[in-house]
Image (tube, helix red, strand yellow):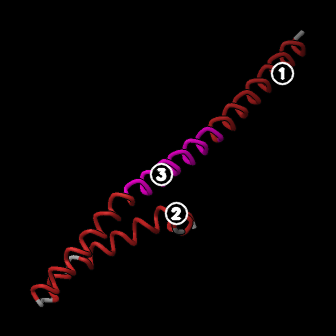
Amino acid sequence: MGFVVSKAMNDSLKGQQEFMRLQLERQLVMQNLMRERQAAMQIAWTREFLKYFGTFFGLAAVVLTTGAIKRKNPAVLLPILPLGFVFSYQYDMGYGTLLQRIKG
C-alpha cells in the first residue's frame, strides 16, 4: 500500500517538475522576445530622431558656415563639432553596428 502512495507522489512530483521546467522555458523565451522588441523599438526611435536631428544639423551647418564667411570669423563654426559627434553617435546607433558592439 505504501508503495502505491509513494509511486503516486513521485509521479505527481515529476509532473510538477516538468511543468515548472516548461514554465521556466516559456518565461525565458518571453523575456528574450521582449528584449528583442525593446531593442527594435530603440533602433526605430533612434532612426526617427536621426531624421529630425539630421535636418537640424544640416541647417545649423549651413547657417553657421554662412555666418562664419560673412563675419570672417571661423570661431562661429565651433558648435558644429559637438553637433557632429551627436549626429555620428545617433547614426551609428540607428544604422551602424553600435548595438552589435555593445552586445559583444
Q: Tell me the crowding category of disc 3: few under 14, some 14 to 19, or many 20 or more residues within 10 angstroms, Cα based.
A: some
Q: Amino acid at mark 3?
A: Ala
Residue 24: x and y in percent read: 66, 36
- In front of the other: label 1 or label 3? 3
- In front of the other: label 2 or label 3? 3
Q: In the visual, does 21 lie left or right of 45?
A: right
Residue 22: x and y in percent read: 73, 32
Residue at 22% across, 81% down: 65
Q: Is residue 30 above or below residue 56?
A: above
Q: In the visual, does 103 lie left or right of 47?
A: right
Q: Quadrant of residue 8?
A: top right
In 3D space, how far apart are the residues under numbered discs 1 and 3 (Cα atoms)? 49 Å
State if disc 1 and disc 2 touch (CB < 8 Å): no
Q: Amino acid at mark 1?
A: Asp
Residue 11, disc: 1
Q: Tell me the crowding category of disc 1: few under 14, some 14 to 19, or many 20 or more residues within 10 angstroms, Cα based.
A: few
Residue 89, disc: none
Which element type, helix, strand or loop, lies under badge 3? Answer: helix
Residue receiving disc 3: 44
Q: Amino acid at mark 2?
A: Leu
Residue at 65% across, 41% down: 29
In 3D space, how far apart are the residues under numbered discs 2 and 1 (Cα atoms)? 47 Å
Q: Write down the region rendered in magenta.
A: 29-49
Q: In the visual, does 62 lie left or right of 22?
A: left
Residue 99, disc: 2
